[in-house]
Image (cartoon, rainbow, N blue to C red):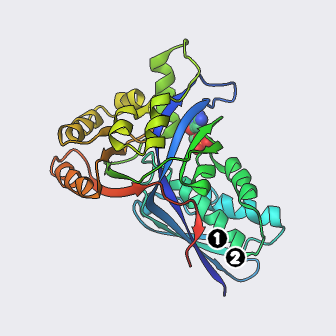
Amino acid sequence: MPIVTASAPAKVNLWLGVGAPGRDGYHPLATVFHALNLEAKVRAETIEPGAGIRITVEGEGADSVPTDASNLAWRAAEAVSKLANVSADVHLHLIKSIPVAGGMAGGSADAAAALVACDALWNTGLSRSDLIGLGATLGSDVPFALHGGTAIGTGRGDRLTPVLGRGEYHWVLAFAEGGLSTPAVYAELDRLRGEDVASPSIPDGLMSALRAGDPLALGGELGNDLEPAALSLRPNLGLLIEDGLDAGALGAQISGSGPTCVFLAKSREHALDLAARLSGTGNCRTVATASGPAAGARIVG
Ligand code: C5P
């Protein structure tokens, strides 16, 4: 039976500006996404006609991942099959290395990889922009997992404009125990901020740091409006961020809605050194290093 494997990257938000919620409950964003070479993989294999969709999972947090229609990868396969008018008889095997509910768009990366894998498996020939359109119906972060690189996201974060920056950036990721619910973090932000909320925008300094490829300048420009809300729900994360800054990180913040914390290093070697120091603090479950910008979802086998 035919098999296709696709991968998709984790993301960090170099900047995450959040406006007041609209009537649909979603918050308008002005964000800068950055894809990392920490990747989700999905192996899609054709199974007998009429068998439907089957999901199995291995890796990071596999036990807590649903294997039914509530899994975004399932919905991705269903969406491609409907658009291409083929029967969705497919076994999706998810190989997870991005933490579940960690603020790094792990579920969205699974969905993006599933979209690309099913498109290839069924020879549907959808364009990248068709897939991005489908991705936006699944979740706000799915389009960027397809796009990759560094990009400005507006709307719900699903309207993307590529950023033509320079250089490679080296990161340390500190994974906290357990996840944080994205809707709960947005709700906490609304509670903390009250009514008067300005429209979000992206600082010029961040864009010039990216154009110059200057990690030192970028470190000083990172920002995340969701951070106070994530810290309010998980105050211990503040200690982790301080640990990283004390250990010489150029910048440190919560990734997306958390609880993963990300630290910008000067170089690959510095990232390894920072990772070793952070893993000794006892304030996080595990650490990893990664670099970006990384490619968007693609076929790898
Ligand atoms: O789009 P997605 O399903 O990933 O969003 C998950 C939840 O995060 C939404 O239900 C909403 O509560 C919150 N969200 C938001 N504003 C955004 C993106 C997500 O309020 N721009």
What's the mark number on residue 84?
Answer: none
Measured as percent of width and height from the top left, residue 87 is found at: 79, 72
Residue 119 to residue 70: above or below: below
Residue 189 to residue 178: above or below: above
Measured as percent of width and height from the top left, residue 16 is found at: 49, 34
Q: Residue at x 84, y 67 (%)?
A: 85
Name the image quarter holding the C terminus: bottom right
Name, please, the residue furthest toward the right.
85
What's the mark number on residue 121?
Answer: 2
Would residue 71 be visible to someone looking at this image? no
Residue 152 to residue 286: above or below: above
Name, please, the residue furthest toward the front.
212
Q: Amino acid at mark 2?
A: Leu
Q: Secondary structure at mark 1?
A: helix
Q: Amino acid at mark 1?
A: Ala
Q: Residues within 10 Å of mark 2 (few under 14, many from 20)?
A: some
